[in-house]
Amino acid sequence: MSVQKIADRLKLDEKLPSMPWFVEQFINYKLPDLSPSTLLEYIRDYESFFGWMIVEGLSTAADYKQIQLLELETLRMEDVTNYRLHLTTRTEGTNTRVTVSRKLSSLRSLFHYLSQIAEDDDFYPLLRRNIMAKVEVKRMHKPKDTAAKLKGKILEDEELLEFVGYILEGYREDIATNKQALYSYELNRERDACITSLILNSGLRVSEVVNLNLIDLDLNQKLMYVSRKGNNDETFKTPIYFREQAKDEIQTYLQLRETRYRTPKKETALFVARPNGQSSGKRMTKRAIQAMIMKYAKSFGKPYLTVHKLRHSFATDYYLQNDIYKTKEQLGHASTETTEIYAHLTDKTMSEAIEKRTDL
């Protein structure tokens, strides 16, 4: 099990006892099919909804655990509408349309299970009336819309190589007068360039990068064994290839990983950091990698660039040279519908291609 999944599973186990018995039953039913991270989001969504029910007087429960099935069964459409308004109009922590859609989807999943799958001792559904079946949850992320938002916010063509080169050398000039920043940069520039190059030449997610171990890397074959999102077989790792362009950065980083970061032999992580005040290196976190990319991106003149947009940058470049099915497999998408983003991102290239004339 990956580092992140272990942490999320522990958090899930910690929160689950505070939920009503029927939510615990639902989570256990879903556990073989969904990741701990997804189920943890479900729990947080139910905390939000149950808390709102208590405040609004729709439940007499003193806490989440005491919420009754009958209270869910007797909810009206007006109540669901009011909850949606609560999510979108409250002054603190207002949710985006995407977040509201996800929260409602979480409730639909629970209500569907209680009304269509779970049974009581007499073989009747646990929930006789499912108000959430009346709620239409619109799909928020259309590939064409997502592609439009990404235009101009990813690296294209020569910029992929230029950004890695900037991390290796160019950034030094921009912080030349800042001794503390310069010290940190000289300590980490090869590692940072390696991480960036690996993502730009493989399309890995940040969580996949964080979870990589030394044993997962086959440099000769330009291959990594990755724990992919949505794969519930914890013993299986997907082989993912990376381009030749990333090989030099990886080799350079591996030569200094142990000595520069004082990494103990027992540390299996591929990418490590030595936090201030600590004597030895340990696995980097998602937050550290995200902050690192944002720091370089801002100075590079691409303030909108994030770790995930590095993945989009690779995918767009890769799609131009391969079909949608190969791109889907390389990125680990569940369906080609998600991969369609890159078809729309390359529209400009396609439009330019059709204008080119050749003599017949």
Image (cartoon, rainbow, N blue to C red):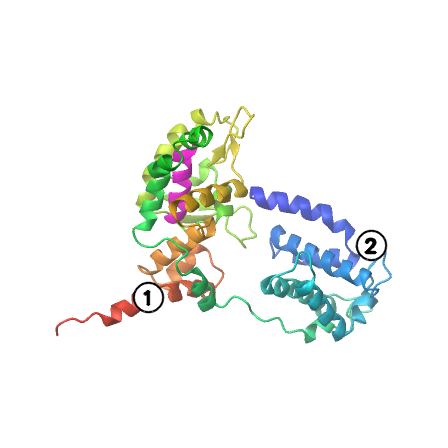
12 shown above or below 276: below
Judge by depth and name the residue closer to the eye, 61 or 297.
297
Q: Where is residue 93 in the image (x, y as percent from the top left)?
A: 66, 56
Q: Disc 1 on helix, strand or loop?
A: helix
Q: Can residue 97 be seen in this view?
A: yes
In x, y percent, where is residue 88? 66, 65
Q: Where is residue 14 in the image (x, y as percent from the top left)?
A: 72, 45
Residue on which disc 1 sits: 348
Based on the displayed image, in which of its 4 quarters is residue 10 positioned?
top right
Identify the amino acid type marked 2.
Asp
Residue labelled with disc 2 = 63
Q: How far apart are marks 1 and 2 (CA)?
A: 54 Å
Mark earlier in primary sequence (1, 2):
2
**Residue 134 vs residue 181: left or right?**
right
Please tell me which residue is depicted at 52% across the width and 28% down the height of the picture. 266
Query: Per the image, is 200 magenta?
Result: yes
Q: Label for residue 125?
A: none
| Residue range corresponding to the magenta coloring | 188-201
Q: Is mark 2 on a helix, strand or loop?
A: loop
The three-letter amino acid code for the residue at tag 1 is Lys
Which of the two discs, 1 and 2, sits closer to the camera? Answer: 1
Which residue is nearer to you in this view: 177 or 166?
A: 177
Please provide percent x and percent y for residue 96: 60, 62
Numbered-mark total = 2
The residue positioned farthest toward the front in the image shown:
177
The residue depicted at 69 percent of the width and 58 percent of the height is 45
Quarter holding the C terminus is bottom left
Q: Which residue is located at x 61 percent, y 43 percent? A: 6
Residue 272 forms part of the magenta stretch? no
The main secondary structure of the magenta stretch is helix
